[in-house]
Structure formats: structure tokens, C-alpha cells
Image (tube, grey):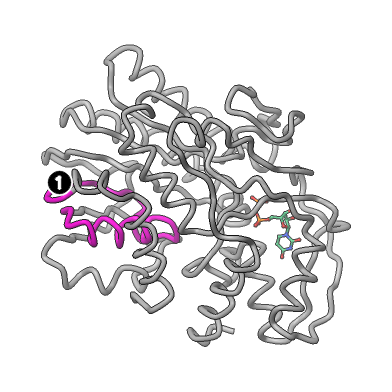
Amino acid sequence: MLDKIVSEDVDFIVLRVGRMGEVLEAQKILVTGGAGFLGSYVCDVLNRLSASVVCVDDLSSGRLENIDHLLKSEKFVLIKADVSSFESNEKFDYVLHMASPAVPEDYQSRPVETMKVNSIGTLNMLELVRKSDAKMLFTSTSEVYGDAKILPTPETYWGNVNPIGVRSCYDEGKRFSEALIMAYVRQYSLDVRIVRIFNTFGPRMRADGMYGRVISRFVDQALSKMPITVYGTGRQTRSFCYVSDTITGMLLTLLSDKAKGEVINIGSPHETTILQLARLIKRMTNSNSRIVFKRLPQDDPRRRVPDIRKAKVLLGWRPLVKLEEGLRRTIEWFKLRGDA
Ligand code: UDP
């Protein structure tokens, strides 16, 4: 569904991408994971820019309702498939490889699939890029830094990841994808750009079951007057970036000549503790939910905040939507959707 809030976000992204976006008109673009939270925003923006989009998604965590309005467009095709086995004889101008479980509980419940999509899936996409002579964007993650010891974390930091821990299927999976991409870049001179996305939130983020992230869960809990579940003491931090800022950063990375072959952090530089976040959401929703404390999950990073100087210099990008404004939009969207 393309509702008013998402539609305004899409307008804002298109405005910020500006004339650079014009090169995408009539281009053939493959988006893997296009039915997910971030992927569906990308599909909406590309559709608005008159690109021809093939979306590959197995709908294991992505949702049809995120893209059902696009199915009417003759410039949009959905292929329900897993990228680990997806094959195509078509040629593409751009490949945006975004498919992967990304929610800790979700990826920990299917660690083998998570590693497959980030190894065989990425290999498949790289071969397709090579055959098509396409440009590629890969969505990596702040999780490649693990429990970072350098904060704010720059792209030059190598990471502090437990290779056999419960999060390793995702962290090491993404690290393997990055290494594989760099091998293809070195050996075959492909045009690939990597974004390391830090915590992003907004409309279309799932709140249900094992798919909920901290913000969608807290909003859902606050609106439905359920206890707000803070894990651990709540002193761990994250830096939350509103979806329209993240998508703008991603597309500028894809389109800017200066980003070719680069790895770029995309995220908010403003750190918040999880307890502060819980209190803020409780206040903004006028909720009388109690805040309760639960066990901290294993290997939960203590602090996470990006150094975004590289994105500022190379892309002229920085987040523009403040946390409270992003939360206001997200809360409104959850209320209108009647999920809670
Ligand atoms: N978290 C929490 N309560 C919840 C869900 C998450 O306190 O109901 C915490 C989680 O332990 C982590 C932070 O919020 O410290 C962010 O969690 P999320 O699942 O959104 O993603 P992560 O940044 O860990 O990948």
C-alpha cells in the first residue's frame, strides 16, 4: 500500500536525489529483497523515477502488502524466488542486492538460509552483474563492526565480531559478501558500491512476532497498552536513522561517480540509549504502558554509532530527519494502519 506518509517520504527522497535520478529513467533494475522494509521504499522511488523494476523476493520476511500497489504498474514485476537459487538470462543496467533476513530473532531462527543468501545469493548476483555489465549496490550492515571498540565507527575499522556467536550467521555472512564483492571488483573490475546501513526505522517496519525491531516493537507495545520490553538495563545505545534519509544515502551511493568501488556508512550520528528511546516513545504516544526489563540477548552490541564523514564528503549526504520527527511519522503510520 502506498499511503500518504510513505508517499511523502518518496517525494522527499526523489527531491533530494535530484537530477542524478534522471539517469534511471527506462533503466532495467533488479532489486532483491524488494518487498522488505527498505527494499519496498527503493522500489517505490525507482517506480517514481520511471525505471523498469524486477523485484525478486521470497516473501520470507518481506510483505506483499508493501508492494501490491506497484503490481498494477507495467514497469514493475515481482518474481517470488530465493536469490540463492534465482537464475535469469535477462540483462540489467543496475542490480540492487538487498535480500537478507535482517532482524536478529529472524536471522537467528534460520541461520543457514541467512548464510546462504549472503554467500551463494551474493555470488549469483555478482555473476549476473558481470554478465550484464551492470552497476551494483550491496546493502551491508553496521553489524560487520560487531561490538565496535572505535566509536563513532569509521569504514576503516575492521570490526570485533564473534565468529561462532548467535549473530555470526548475519555478521559473518555480510562480511563474506563484502569480501566476495571486493574479490570480483579486483579480479573483474566490476562497478560495485557497498553501503553499511546502521539502524533504520520508519513505516513498513514489521512489529509482529520475531520480525519486530526495537522501534516498531516499542511503538506497537505503547499503542496497544502492553508493557514496553527493554532488554538488559537499557543502557546499550543505537543511532536511529529515519528511512527516507537512509534510502537517499543509498541512492546517492548508487548514482555518484565518487562512490564507485567504495564502502560507505549510512546512518544517524546521534546516539540514544534504549531506555531513553522507550521513555520517548511512551511520552510521544501518551501511553500508560509500563516499562519492563527483560534479559539482554547474547552478543548484543553495547554501543553503535557511525562516523559518517565519508558519506558527507563523497555524497554530500547527511540525515535531515530528527529522531522525534521520524518517530512522529512512524507512530502516525502505525496508528493509521491499525496494527496496534
Ligand atoms: N531491544 C529491546 N527490546 C526489544 C527489542 C530490542 O530492548 O523489544 C534492544 C536490543 O537488545 C538492542 C536494541 O534494542 O540492544 C536494538 O535492537 P534491534 O532488534 O532493533 O536491532 P539490533 O540493533 O540489535 O540489530
Identify which amino acid the numbered label 1 is placed on: Gln
Q: Neighbour class for label 1 at 10 Å: few (<14), some, many (≥20)?
A: some
| Residue 40 located within the stretch drawn in magenta | yes
In this image, 196 relative to 217: left or right? left
Above or below, comparing residue 33 to residue 263 in the picture: below
Which of these two is toward me, 269 or 222?
A: 269
Residue to which mark 1 is pinned: 27
Classify mark 1 as within 8 Å of ligand 1 or not, answering yes or no. Answer: no
Q: Position of residue 340 (x, y in %)?
A: 59, 84
Q: Residue at x 73, y 49 (%)?
A: 271
Left or right position of 40 against 282? left
Q: Nearer the viewer, residue 317 or 287?
A: 317
The residue stretch that appears in magenta:
25-52
**How many marks are shown on the rendered structure?**
1
Q: Residue at x 69, y 50 (%)?
A: 270
Instruction: Tell me the residue at 46%/58% (across/down).
Output: 244
As drawn, which residue projects farthest toward the top?
187
Q: Is residue 166 above or below residue 60?
A: above
Q: Residue at x 34, y 57 (%)?
A: 15
Q: Which sits in the foreground, 129 or 89?
A: 129
Query: Is residue 172 located in the magenta-colored stretch of the structure?
Result: no
